[in-house]
Image (cartoon, rainbow, N blue to C red):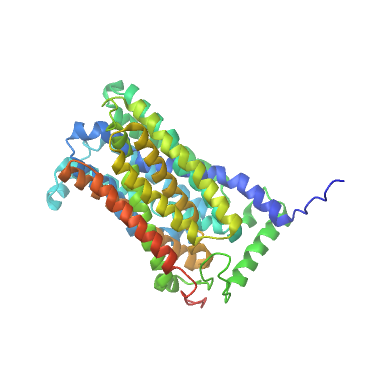
């Protein structure tokens, strides 16, 4: 005798359709965003010698992206809420594509008296300036997407949804590493340009295409989605509204591991101790992510790979990121299934820390080093997949726009300091081992802060009119 089928509500059907319609588009957009952000890691293999950049110059330039990102993150997310995701994300993608492509001519752009004013050599200044401008151009993209997903999916589905979206980080590296290596190896000298110049030109084009797709295909809210039935649009809107209402004044800690008092105003969010704690935790996570990702091609090259074997470097770099993509989806799904958040976040950080220590111990041995990198990338990406369920559990409305952007802005300063510290230590000591141990210690500290500092005793104001 067949078991009766479970009744599928209009809301459940709508969520499933929304996931199929929205996530592939957002996934592709984040792939090209992340690729434009980190392809400088591959370009460095040629560009540094062509332009005479030391590891310290490269590390600072790679990281200064996040200073521009930090300064414009909160304003950008508030403007996204005002103008709508479709308009604002399209604007972001077009501007970052233009700036990213300009890197191909970084040594040919006249900066006038600015290099002398800042006391920086002209070539280094051009590199720093474009990385800073790229951060400004991209500011608001990632937290904007996190905010956008709260318009479409309830809290119980959010970790897995974010994990699926964030597999784009792994995919960007799995796809981008061999493509970047192949461009640098086989386009080198074509049209009189070096391979690293072609890398920036060719990898800016997908951002333009994705921006056009966002403009024509991304509805701002469920009510505007023509591919949902009227009943599905109404059911999704009603369920999310009910969740917001129920969250006000609620004190159930069991489901998420954090207090669920809800902030709806930007001022309350930025005054919340819990928001600041989560920003510090996120800061440590980005230290680890970008401290390794910007240096991944160099780390792999130093395992004994040929200096100009760019495609081989790219293929080996795929392995840690491919592994991480699988693990992060599993971690996000498990977190949603169990309803537990804090232990998943902390556990991911512990795994990343173990991988960083193992990377130091592995030295230049290829197989152990790649296994260690798999632990680092899997831990870091699983952290990002589950982390965003913590702030979105207690931030709503304008507080969500401001709080999520602030956490991401402060946290992404790790993207500045991580690569910079690795570069400075490599220049001073001739090895990145001390930098990796420092990143491991930060990850452990953040894991402990997650377990001890985001619990039920934390509380924020719930007034709507801030």
**For the image shown, how many numbered marks are present on the structure?**
0
Lateral position of residue 336 relative to residue 68, left or right: right
Residue 128 image position (x, y, % from top left): 24, 46
The answer to which quarter of the image holds residue 46 is top left
Residue drawn where x is 52% and y is 50% of the image: 331
Instruction: Point out residue 391 in the picture as x, y percentages from the top left corner.
Output: 48, 63
Q: Is residue 287 visible?
A: yes
State the residue lying farthest toward the right. Answer: 1
Q: Quadrant of residue 292?
A: top left
The answer to which image quadrant residue 12 occupies is bottom right
Looking at the picture, tell me which residue is in the foreground, 116 or 13.
Answer: 13
Q: Position of residue 143 (x, y in %)?
A: 45, 56
Q: Is residue 117 left or right of residue 188?
A: left
Picture residue at 44% right of the left edge, 74% below the top: 268
Q: Nearer the viewer, residue 130 or 244?
A: 244
In this view of the protein, can residue 152 be seen by the observer?
no
Q: Give 317 or 185, whichever is nearer the viewer.
A: 317
Q: Is residue 192 above or below residue 262?
A: above
| Residue 215 on image: x %, y % | 52, 46
- Asked if residue 262 lies left or right of residue 377, the reply is right
């Amino acid at each position: 005798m067949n078991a009766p089928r479970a009744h599928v509500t209009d809301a459940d059907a709508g969520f499933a359709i929304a996931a199929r319609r929205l996530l592939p588009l957002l996934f592709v957009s984040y792939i090209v965003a992340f690729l434009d952000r980190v392809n400088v890691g591959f370009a460095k293999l040629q560009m540094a010698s062509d332009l005479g950049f030391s590891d310290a110059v490269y590390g600072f330039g790679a990281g200064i992206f996040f200073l521009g990102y930090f300064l414009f993150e909160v304003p950008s997310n508030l403007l996204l809420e005002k103008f709508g995701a479709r308009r604002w994300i399209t604007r972001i993608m077009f501007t970052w594509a233009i700036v990213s492509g300009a890197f191909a001519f970084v040594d040919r752009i006249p900066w006038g008296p600015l290099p002398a004013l800042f006391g920086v050599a002209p070539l280094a200044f051009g590199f720093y300036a474009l990385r800073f401008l790229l951060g400004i151009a991209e500011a608001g993209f990632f937290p904007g997407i996190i905010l956008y997903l709260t318009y479409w999916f309830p809290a119980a589905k959010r970790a897995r949804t974010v994990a699926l979206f964030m597999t784009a980080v792994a995919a960007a590296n799995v796809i981008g590493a061999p493509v970047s290596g192949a461009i640098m190896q086989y386009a080198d000298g074509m049209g009189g340009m070096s391979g690293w110049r072609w890398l920036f030109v060719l990898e800016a084009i997908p951002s333009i295409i994705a921006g056009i797709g966002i403009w024509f295909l991304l509805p701002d809210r469920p009510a505007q989605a023509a591919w949902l039935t009227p009943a599905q649009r109404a059911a999704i809107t009603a369920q999310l509204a009910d969740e917001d209402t129920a969250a006000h004044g609620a004190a159930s800690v069991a489901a998420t591991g954090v207090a669920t008092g809800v902030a709806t105003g930007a001022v309350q969010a930025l005054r919340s101790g819990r928001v600041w704690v989560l920003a510090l935790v996120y800061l440590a996570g980005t230290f680890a992510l970008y401290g390794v990702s910007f240096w991944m091609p160099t780390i792999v090259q130093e395992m004994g790979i040929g200096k100009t074997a760019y495609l081989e470097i790219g293929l080996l770099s795929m392995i840690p990121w491919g592994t991480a993509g699988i693990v992060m989806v599993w971690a996000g799904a498990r977190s949603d299934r169990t309803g537990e958040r804090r232990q998943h976040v902390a556990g991911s950080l512990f795994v990343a820390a173990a991988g960083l220590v193992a990377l130091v111990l592995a030295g230049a041995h290829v197989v152990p080093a790649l296994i260690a990198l798999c632990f680092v990338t899997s831990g870091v990406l699983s952290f990002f997949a589950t982390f965003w369920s913590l702030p979105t559990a207690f931030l709503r409305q304008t507080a969500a726009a401001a709080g999520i952007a602030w956490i991401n802005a402060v946290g992404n300063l790790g993207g500045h300091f991580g690569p910079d510290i690795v570069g400075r230590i490599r220049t001073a000591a001739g090895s990145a081992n001390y930098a990796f141990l420092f990143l491991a210690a930060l990850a452990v500290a953040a894991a402990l802060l997650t377990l001890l500092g985001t619990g039920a005793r934390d509380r924020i104001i719930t007034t709507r009119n801030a």
